[in-house]
């Protein structure tokens, strides 16, 4: 049977092109139903209109090319058969009602509107949610506190220093009066600086005072996966009700919604409902909303609409305080001398600081030695050699952008006015100098199609450096700031 061999072979071929994740989430949901040689038509079947729409919008050329090749025909037609739902076939036309489960999330019109609706008013969608009969509610009541890590992350074991005091104070206030003060609350900062800790601390504190509060914690990348699976397995209603019934929604690493248009759409809707009902929503992210690429304008404005606070790099004193707190929690004793040393080796990242501390304790205990400065030095010697501050494209881009008073978004844009081009060139140059990324990767990060533009930028900077002392000074100054 042609269907038995063609489809698996097709999947194998396109796996190379689109990656396993896309195959598993989208293509594997499809059934190859047959091939009509007389009309040169391949018949496929998707589990629901959404999968069908997604595949036809994004992958029609891919179907045509590879299935065509496997079927030895140059020009083939791809036809998705109607799914079991009566409305499914007409849903493709745009105006037809989707099944009520999907309709509630997608009722706010366009699905692929990232970046286009900048003027959209900040009002919740007017279309009411579809209320499903009670039988469906079984699946949603899994737990009141979905995914909350209960013990580790609390306010009481969070060390407050100048770098996080504002975020801490706001988090504490929110835990006392959820939904009343700053909603949403948006915490951003580099990796390993305590965002997730603070997010859970809010959840845990509220849980303590209000046992019935329905708290949902989710990281945005899991949210994306959950959403895709909900679509694929027709569980959109359960997915949605898990979130819309929350009293407190904690979303970690919202930057992962970047370029996920459909998920943003779904999230947008959930956000509006909760926000309107004055349910507290807290986000964390590695950057400011405006620096998250591929975020629909209306999403961005929602994220920025409450309080936005950063967590910056801890000072030496705070690092020492954190070390002492962690040692205490581990029931270990650490001298000031060793604490100072560990704090000075690890430049900024608290997660790495914790890791280093645990290594030091473990080594002392395993070799039955006193934890002296020499021992700590021995254990962490390699850390110091091999690890400078982790500098990434994002950081350099954001720093240079800020220096020139632009957003990272603008650096990545196609705009070409003089000052912006200069900022972009400098960013590219520093990215090449201070990371291990290839020209291609830098190009991709900056949304450039062709990496020869990257090369051109580097040449320009190299050239100007040679004869423009002020320019050279600026470069050095930026380098210094980025490295420290
Ligand atoms: P992020 O989410 O910003 O990447 P995390 O919240 O996961 O960072 O923090 C990394 C680790 O560092 C966690 O184990 C956390 O408990 C710890 N940590 C970070 N900041 C602090 C702090 N101010 N006090 C105590 N522990 C901290
Ligand atoms: Mg985190």
Image: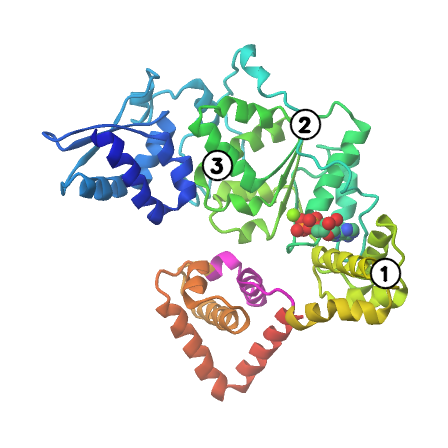
Label 1 near ligand 1 (CB < 8 Å): no
User: Which residue lies under the disc numbered 1?
Assistant: 368
Can you give x and y, in whole percent of width and height, for residue 179 in the image? 70, 32
- Residue designated by label 2: 247
Q: Which of marks 1 and 3 is in front?
A: 1
Q: What stretch is highlighted in magenta?
A: 388-411
Looking at marks 3 and 2 on the same chain, the residue that comes earlier in the sequence is marked by: 2
What's the residue at 13%, 33% (across, down)?
40
Q: Is disc 3 placed on a helix, strand or loop?
A: helix
Query: Which residue is disc 3 drawn over?
Result: 263
Which type of secondary structure does the marked residue at label 2 adopt? loop
Is 343 magenta? The answer is: no
The alpha-carbon separation of the residues under discs 1 and 3 comes to 52 Å
- Would residue 309 be visible to someone looking at this image? no
Q: Residue furthest front?
A: 367
Q: Foreground: 466 or 122? A: 466
Residue 326 in sight here: yes
Total number of numbered discs in the rendering: 3
| Position in image of residue 305 (x %, y %) | 61, 42
């Amino acid at each position: 049977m042609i269907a038995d061999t063609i489809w698996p072979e097709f999947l194998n071929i396109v796996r190379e092109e689109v990656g396993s994740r896309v195959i598993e989430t989208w293509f594997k949901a499809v059934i190859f139903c047959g091939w009509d040689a007389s009309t040169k038509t391949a018949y496929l079947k998707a589990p629901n209109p959404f999968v069908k729409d997604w595949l036809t919008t994004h992958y029609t050329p891919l179907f045509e090319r590879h299935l065509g090749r496997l079927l030895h025909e140059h020009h083939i037609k791809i036809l998705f058969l109607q799914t079991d739902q009566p409305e499914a076939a007409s849903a493709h036309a745009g105006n037809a009602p989707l099944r009520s489960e999907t309709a509630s999330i997608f009722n706010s019109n366009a699905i692929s509107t990232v970046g286009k609706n900048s003027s959209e008013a900040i009002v919740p969608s007017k279309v009411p949610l579809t209320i499903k009969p009670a039988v469906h509610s079984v699946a949603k009541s899994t737990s009141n506190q979905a995914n909350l890590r209960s013990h580790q992350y609390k306010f009481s074991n969070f060390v407050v220093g100048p770098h996080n005091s504002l975020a801490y104070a706001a988090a504490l206030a929110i835990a006392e009066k959820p939904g009343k003060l700053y909603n949403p609350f948006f915490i951003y900062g580099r990796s390993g600086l305590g965002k997730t800790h603070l997010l859970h601390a809010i959840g845990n504190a509220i849980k303590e005072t209000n046992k019935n509060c329905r708290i949902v914690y989710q990281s945005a990348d899991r949210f994306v996966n959950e959403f895709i699976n909900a679509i694929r397995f027709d569980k959109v209603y359960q997915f949605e009700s898990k979130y819309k019934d929350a009293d407190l929604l904690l979303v970690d690493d919202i930057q992962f919604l970047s370029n996920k248009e459909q998920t943003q759409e779904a999230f947008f809707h959930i956000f509006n409902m909760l926000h309107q009902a004055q349910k507290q929503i807290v986000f964390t992210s590695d950057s400011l909303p405006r620096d998250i690429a591929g975020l629909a304008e209306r999403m961005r404005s929602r994220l920025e609409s409450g309080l936005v606070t950063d967590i910056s790099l801890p000072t030496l004193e705070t690092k020492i305080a954190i070390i002492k707190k962690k040692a205490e929690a581990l029931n270990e004793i650490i001298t000031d001398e060793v604490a100072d040393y560990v704090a000075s080796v690890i430049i900024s990242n608290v997660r790495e600081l914790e890791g280093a501390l645990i290594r030091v304790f473990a080594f002392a205990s395993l070799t039955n030695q006193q934890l002296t400065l020499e021992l700590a030095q021995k254990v962490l010697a390699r850390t110091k050699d091999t690890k400078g501050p982790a500098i990434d494209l994002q950081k350099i881009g954001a720093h240079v952008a800020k220096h020139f008073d632009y957003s990272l978004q603008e650096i990545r844009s196609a705009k070409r006015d003089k000052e912006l081009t200069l900022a972009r060139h400098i960013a590219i140059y520093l990215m090449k100098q201070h990371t291990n990324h290839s020209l291609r990767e830098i190009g991709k990060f900056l949304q450039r199609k062709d990496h020869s533009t990257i090369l051109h930028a580097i040449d320009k900077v190299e050239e100007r450096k040679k004869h423009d002392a002020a320019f050279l000074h600026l470069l050095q100054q930026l380098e210094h700031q980025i490295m420290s």
